[in-house]
Every structure is written in C-alpha cells, then in structure tokens.
Amino acid sequence: MEKMVECCLALIYILLTVASVGLLVVRMVEGRSVRWLVVLMVSGGILSCLVHSYVLKVGLVIVVCGLVHYIGRDEDMLPVLNRAVLITGCDSGLGHDLARCLDAAGMRVFAGVLDESSPGAVELKKASSSKLTVIQLDITNMSQIKQAYQYIQSQTGETGLWGLVNNAGVLGYVCDAELLPIKFYRKYLEVNFIGSVEVTQAFLPLIRQSKGRIISISSMAGEIPLPGFPAYGASKAALSAYSGTIRLELSRWGVKVIVIQPGAFKTNILGNREHWVRVHDEILSGLSPDVMEAYGEEYISSLQERLVKMSSSSSSNTEQFLDALKHALLSTRPKAFYYPGAAAWALPFLYRHSPTFLSDMIFSRIFMPPDVKPAQL
Ligand SMILES: NC(=O)c1ccc[n+]([C@@H]2O[C@H](COP(=O)([O-])OP(=O)(O)OC[C@H]3O[C@@H](n4cnc5c(N)ncnc54)[C@H](OP(=O)(O)O)[C@@H]3O)[C@@H](O)[C@H]2O)c1
C-alpha cells in the first residue's frame, strides 16, 4: 500500500514538473518575459531534488507552480479594442511618441496639444491613423479643457474614456532656488500640478464610467531633493502626492491611478539655447546687488552648461517609457509606480533606504559639481 502511494506521488511529481516546464515554453514562444519564472523553477527543481520524500517534492512543486501562476498573472494584457485614451502635451517628446505608439497599437487616441499648429501637432496628424484625433488643449486654460471634454464625451459615448495620461509639463532651466524668479515657481506649479489636477477633475466622470486609469508623468525630482530643480521638484512632488491620494479614493470606484517617474530622456523638456539665454537675462535683471555679488555672473552663466551636460547624458530611445506606459494602461494588474529609463529607480531607492547624510553627499556630488561654485564660496 505504502509503495502504491509513493508511486502515485512520484507520478504526480513528474506530471507537475512536465506541466510547469511546458507552461514556461509556451510563455517563451509567446515572447513574454520568463526571467523570474526560470529562476523560480530552477530553484524549485534543485530543492525538490535535494529532498527524498515524494510528499515534500509534490508540495514544493505545487508552491512553485502557484508562484509561477501568480507572477505570470502580471503579464496579462487587456484588449485595446474600443479603449480610448487622452494624452496631454503631445506636441513633442514623450507624449508625442506615446500618442504614435498607442495609435499603432490600435487604441483610440485623443492627443492634446498646446498649439494645434505646432510642427509636432501637424506631424502627428499626418503620421497617424484616422483613429487618432489631435485636440487643442492648453491644460491651464479652463475653456479649452471644457471643449475637449465635450468633444471626447460625444465621441466615446457609453464606453467612457479608458485612460488619461497627464503628460504635459515644463522645466526648461536648472537654477539654484535663491536665484529662480518667483514667476517660474508659479508657472511650474500652474502647468505641472494645477493644470493636471484640472484636467483630471474634468475627465473623471468619463474615467469612472469605464473604471479606467489615470496616469501621471511625475519625476524623480518630485521624490528626492535635486539641487537645481527647486520649483520643478516642488510641482512634481505636489503631483505625486495628489496622485497618491486619489489612488486610494478612486480605488472604490474601480479606477486605478498610476505614477510614472521616468529617467532622463532626450526631449524638449530642457529647452534650447535661445530659451536659456532669455531665462538667464531675466534672472540677472531681477537679482539684488548683494545676491548678484554672492553668486557672480560667471557662476550664473555656467548653469547653462549643466543643461548641455544633462541633455547629452539623456537617452534618445524612449522604448522603456513606452513599454511602461503600455503596461500601466493595459495590464490587468498595473503597478502603482513605474521607473522607466536607465537606473531611474536607483536614486529614489538610495534616498528611501540610506541615511540622509549619505544620500545628501551623493546627490550633491552628482548635481553640484565641486569645480563650479558661486563667487563668494
Ligand atoms: N524627458 C525627461 O527626461 C523627463 C524625466 C522626468 C519626467 N518628465 C516629464 O515627462 C513629461 C513629458 O515631458 P517631455 O520630456 O516629453 O518634454 P517635452 O518634449 O517638453 O514635452 C512636454 C510637452 O508639454 C507641452 N506643454 C507645456 N505646457 C503645456 C500646457 N500648458 N498645456 C499643454 N501642453 C503643454 C509642451 O509644449 P511646448 O513644447 O510647446 O512647450 C510639450 O509638448 C513632463 O511632464 C516631464 O516633466 C520628463
């Protein structure tokens, strides 16, 4: 009798092992990521070889299969058919690429642009399918938000809007907090925070209707203190905090709220020479004589070189960002946070898990090069 039980258990063990290897092969053939599944199954296999009891072997394989199934669930994607998404700030950069990518994937895209006649908006109209609509949408202009809402509501009908991507944003200069004119603090907050909140409030009825998703493109500057980004960081911190709150509130409505903290991608976000010169002149003209003396014109002019360096170390390939956004919009189990881009998770991780003196030292080294100092230091 004991022998028979042992034989049955051995058979179950072999069948389960074959089934899990088969599952792995199917996933590989489907082109899905199997990295973690392989690690799990190999370690489960080694462990089960080390134990002699077939009861334990079967138990181990069942646990491994359960874990494989749980991790595998993450990968399931919803069909794109009839899902509509509104993306703000599609004139250029990440929003522009995302609009084209989701259009190519078959989603119904409403691409909000700051200026309908901008080269980016015109190119988007030309290069996309008839399912993509370019919409005039300055997110700081309430009447444009209302018009966009009425249009999208009339187009989506009963289905509602599946996704809202709060992407529009401004940066354009890197500067010590003491030097940055107050009007820039107001502008960053107005666009990066208030504008996104206004668009979110306006479109929430359509998103609740579809039990859809709100995705906000924040920044690591909103989580960690980055020298040179005082106003931008504050505006993104506000956006992240707001998104965290509505993630909890809207979960009761079946709406998912997601924050993206991208790494450095080469877009228009850092501005251009012409813009830098304008901001530089504006900063100089607003400084009191004692602040001017403390920092010195040479240091203030050197800030533009930081922008050049940042731009040259940014990635031109937005694929990781686009993959994260597709997952956030269409996965059955989207994450609350995504960190696409080279090591985008690393600095926030360091900030969260290391003593402040250590992260302060590292961030200062990276973002305040010791060779460039204000005149009186
Ligand atoms: N690129 C990165 O490395 C990076 C990293 C972290 C976070 N982000 C965030 O990612 C988002 C996209 O930025 P990006 O890098 O793609 O920069 P981008 O190329 O400058 O794109 C931002 C877009 O928003 C538009 N915009 C500005 N003000 C607007 C307003 N009031 N209403 C509607 N649209 C407006 C801009 O139009 P104009 O060009 O005409 O001003 C631009 O087309 C931003 O929220 C940014 O903060 C970017």
Image: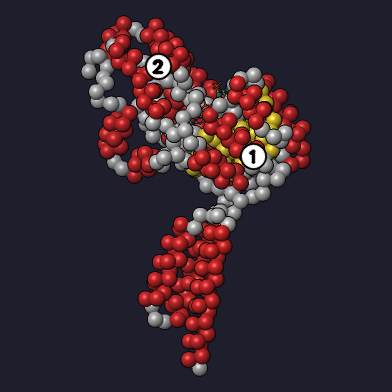
Ligand 1 contact, mark 1 (Cβ < 8 Å): no
Q: Determine which residue is flagged by label 1.
A: 104
What residue is drawn where x is 49% and y is 28%? 267
Q: Determine which residue is flagged by label 2.
A: 180
Give the amino acid at mark 2: Leu
Residue 191, quarter of the rendered image: top right
Q: What crowding class fits label 2: few (fewer than 14 Cα within 10 Å), some (14-19), or many (20 or more)? A: many
What residue is drawn where x is 72% and y is 39%? 160
What residue is drawn where x is 53% and y is 59%? 28
**Residue 185 point in image, percent of width and height:** 46, 20
Element class at badge 1: helix
Extreme residue in the left direction: 377
What residue is drawn where x is 39% and y is 71%? 46
Q: How is the image coloured?
A: secondary structure
Q: What crowding class fits label 1: few (fewer than 14 Cα within 10 Å), some (14-19), or many (20 or more)? A: some
Give the amino acid at mark 1: Ala
Q: Is residue 313 visible?
A: yes
Query: Above or below — where is 107 with respect to 5?
Result: above
**Residue 321 point in image, percent of width and height:** 51, 39
